[in-house]
Image: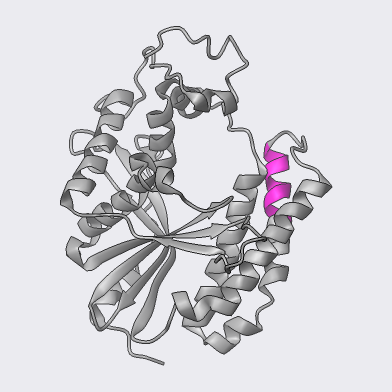
Amino acid sequence: MKKVPKNLKPLLEHKESPIDWTKDKIVSYSQFSTWKQCPHKWKLQSVDKLKQSPNMHLVFGNAIHTTIQHYLKTMFEQSATAADREDIIQLFEASLRSEYKKSVEQNNNIHFSNAEELNEFYKDGEAILDYFKKKRGKYFSKRNTYLVGVEFPLSLSPHEDYPNVKFKGFIDLIFYNENTETLQIYDIKTSTRGWKDKEKKDDTKVSQILLYKEYFSRLFNWDVDKIEVEFFIVKRKIWEESEYTIPRIQEFTPASGKIKRSKSINEFRSFIEDCFDKEGKPLIKEFTKQVSPLCTWCQFNDEPSLCNKINLS
């Protein structure tokens, strides 16, 4: 077994920070993203505690995450041979069923899918994982590389004037390259057909991994220029009729320099300022109702008592 570099030991020993529920308010990238889409929707979900409607895309994403992370954890902690012996298709199927069952229970035992759709998502996952296993060497290698963490917990107060508002997130994968002395943060994304320019230029979407980079650097006093970030995007659908082989996996490395990170950090600070008082309690006020094409898919769109489109921005 390779000797672990000394500078990695604090990271390998890092545990999830305890939360003082009597005073701490937890915020996440998901909450921030919802607030950016529509502050009123954020209020309905995070203050009024109205649950988000479950869907198969969320179920599928969780199952794919679990499966890929398990394979890579086995590969780096044991061997590539041991990882290849794993029946990851069977693991994915079990995870898909488990995630769906859990979501149904949280949805008052009301089903939100059917056998045909479940089978379609299963087949998509099977195709992704078959491609991933065959092409794994193109994306991940153990050479001079250490696995630092899977679902690595990240927690800190991102705004000095709001100490009780705590950011909490989990980084999908972190690796360390001994030759370059850099950390590589991966965020796994599931997508129907991959990210186009629209998604790549979506500052809110990209800000997740930029916040991870900045907050990780602060929490562990790690040189921010020695942290690289990448979205690892798996596609459910590809154009089967193409004369070229279309990969099921897409890699996207966004610009993550100081200017880009500062923009994401300042917007996250604005989110905190707009939603909480200095003690971390949600503000009692009328939150902006942001009308956009996304309203069509909003679960509150057809409920006039919840969203009557008054006070539009």
Foreground residue among 132 and 168: 132
* Residue 171 locus on image (x, y percent): 40, 58
Please state, as top left, top right, bottom left or bottom right, where the N terminus lies in the image.
bottom left
Q: Residue furthest top?
A: 310
Q: Does 218 appear above or below 107?
A: below
Residue bounds of the magenta highlight: 97-106
Tell me which residue sits at (69%, 65%) in the image. Answer: 126
Residue 262 visible in rendering: yes
Image-based side of 99 in relation to 37, left or right: right
Main secondary structure of the magenta stretch: helix
Q: Residue furthest bottom?
A: 1
**Residue 102 drawn in magenta:** yes
Q: Does 34 appear above or below 85?
A: above
Foreground residue among 246 and 181: 246
Question: In terms of image quadrants, where is residue 177?
Answer: bottom left
Q: Does 292 appear above or below 226?
A: above
Q: Does 66 appear above or below 292?
A: below
Tell me which residue sits at (25%, 65%) in the image. Answer: 227
Please state, as top left, top right, bottom left or bottom right, where the C terminus lies in the image.
top left
Q: Residue furthest right?
A: 115
* Residue 80 locus on image (x, y percent): 53, 86
Tell me which residue sits at (64%, 49%) in the image. Answer: 59
Residue 28 visible in rendering: no
* Residue 9 locus on image (x, y percent): 29, 76
Image-based side of 161 in relation to 169, left or right: left
Question: In terms of image quadrants, where is residue 167?
Answer: top left
For the image, the number of numbered tags is 0
